Amino acid sequence: MLHFDEYFTDRYDAGRQLAAALARFKDFDPVVLALPRGGVPVAFEVARVLRAPLDLLLARKLGAPGAPELGIGAVIDGDDPQLVLNDEAIRFVQPPDGYVAAEMQRQLAEIERRRSFYLGERAPVSVRGRAVILVDDGIATGGTARVALKALRKAGVSRLVLAIPLAPRESLQILQEEADEVICLETPNPFQAVGIHYADFTQTSDDDVVRLLVEARAFTTRKG
């Protein structure tokens, strides 16, 4: 039984509720992208209902020279990897010539390692000219989602939709500037943390991610 501050039984329940709100996008022949790891079970249910391909959107922060915890940008993987720089941080740090390109390649190598772990030799689903639905299990500040949306826009998607079970209103206002549409089921006020609104917010394991991505391949092979 859910308590008053719990909207979802678990991530799969959140995904099913989110899928119901996204049903009209089935006619767009979308690609569903999940932010790992927590976004994968949610996106799995969305992809199942829409019978859409499911893929991961892997992102890595670019750290500043000598201060890797300070982000000066991010790189997002895909069939056409995209670099998104934090212009303010770049002006402050003033990295030496060649640093950003080298750091981007280093982070892309880590992304490729993680993609290989989760997906083996499977190539990223092409998003250019496609409608894309980006899914996570919830948003607090929205920093990662914002970078991901910027990168997807640069990658040439035809329509960009952010779909999340819950987020604070102030984060949604920022993210709405980056997407064509934002679908959010709940906006708790005050907002404290994503996990308290799930009865079960057990961490999604790497094995779960691999299993769900394999199972999701059936959604598109059974089309028609």
Image (tube, rainbow, N blue to C red):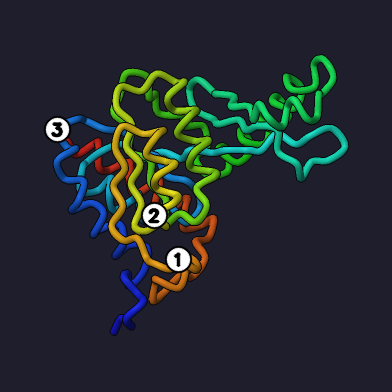
Residue 183's place in the image compared with 220, above or below, is below
Give the residue pinned by disc 2. 169
Q: What is the x, y in percent for residue 163?
A: 33, 46
Hey, what amino acid is under mark 1?
A: Phe
Residue at the spot x=25%, y=42% of the render? 219
Q: Quadrant of residue 1?
A: bottom left
Residue drawn at point x = 40 percent, y = 71 percent: 197
Q: Are marks 1 and 2 in contact (CB under 8 Å)?
A: yes
Q: Amino acid at mark 3?
A: Asp
Residue 30: x and y in percent read: 26, 32
Q: Which residue is mark 3?
A: 27
* Corner quadrant of residue 174: top left
Mark 3 vs mark 1: which is more N-terminal?
A: 3
Outermost residue to the left: 224
Q: Which residue is mark 1?
A: 191
State the residue in front, 138 or 52: 138
Between 153 and 28, which is closer to the camera in this rendering? 153
Across and down, in percent, residue 29 comes to: 21, 30
Is 31 on the left or on the right of 142, as rendered?
left
* Residue at horizontal 50 percent and vertical 20 percent from the top: 80
Label 2 packing within 10 angstroms: few (<14), some (14-19), many (20+):
some
Q: Is 66 above or below relative to 191?
A: above
Q: Is residue 126 above or below residue 168?
A: above
**C-alpha distance separating marks 2 and 3:** 29 Å
